[in-house]
Image: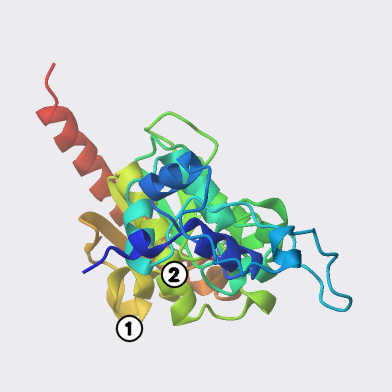
Amino acid sequence: MTEPSARLTPQTLQWTQALGLGPLFVRREVLREQQAQTVPEAAPEVIATPAAAKPVAQPPKPNRPVPPPRPASPIPITDAARLEAIACMDWDELQAGAQACRACKLGSSRHQAVFGSGSTQARWMIIGEAPGAEEDRQGQPFVGAAGQLLDAMLQAIGLDRSADDSERAVYITNVLKCRPPGNRNPEPEEVGQCAPWLERQAALLQPQLILALGRFAAHSLLGSQAPISQLRGQVHEFAGIPVIVSYHPAYLLRNPGDKARVWRDLCFARDLADAAAAKAAATRPD
Ligand code: URA
């Protein structure tokens, strides 16, 4: 079978980009080949009329706005190639890729993608649902009222999102990198398209523990539909990394009576992370 990217000629790339049919994901080796070519390999046949023999630039047709040229996207045109490219990215490439992503419709309604924040040396990865209005404006996860409560929860167990020592640092992100308009629930297609960014974040970070906050994060990570009340208090797994589930801080703002449960979840998570750190220290060569 022909490789999908092998069918992508420089012309196809140009046309699809001019038509706004992004995101266009192209393997790096294909891009390099295209950049090395001075003559397009499949130039359309030109019929030898006087006009065609001497092409002149045509002004754009009235009432047909010409879309602005899109920057050549560094990544995939097919799902398989896209996944493959994302799975090889480093942190900088990943962040730039997520920022340029138009794989679902949220790419055109958001102000910016909210990639994640915190130390890439962190042992804790905290995963929420999706950016809200304030996160979309500031480009940082959990900056609204729920974010303040999250900061307080983290501080209570000795963690701090602005710390960069691995003891106290956390890395915070969301299942979706772009804000669903009107804070509606994320759609399955959006979650599917966004998943490779999160998977690569987890693979690069290799945290000792993931804390999934809320039903939506828990269901997306664990592929389960069980209520939070059932998922709490157990160690689950995502990509080989232990996952603890707790209530979302926004839920807690509405249901402060559940704070004691969240406190138990945090202590459970803290014990698990401490045990993993002690085990790692014991097996580390001197
Ligand atoms: N802000 C986020 O970044 N994520 C959430 O899940 C909620 C608020």
- Which label sits in the foreground, 2 or 1? 2
Amino acid type of the residue tagged 2 in the rendering: Gln
Residue 157 at what x, y percent from top left? 42, 45
Instruction: Return the residue at label 2.
Output: 193
Amino acid type of the residue tagged 1 in the rendering: Gln
Instruction: Return the residue at label 1.
Output: 225
Point out the tag, 2 or 1, that comes first from the N-terminus.
2
Question: Quarter holding the N terminus?
Answer: bottom left
Q: Is residue 17 above or below residue 88?
A: below
Residue 216 at what x, y percent from top left? 44, 74
Q: Nearer the viewer, residue 272 or 33?
A: 33
Q: Is residue 201 above or below residue 250?
A: above
Quarter of the image where one finds residue 81: bottom left
Question: Quarter holding the C terminus?
Answer: top left
Which structural element holds mark 2?
helix
Residue at image position (42%, 59%) is 76
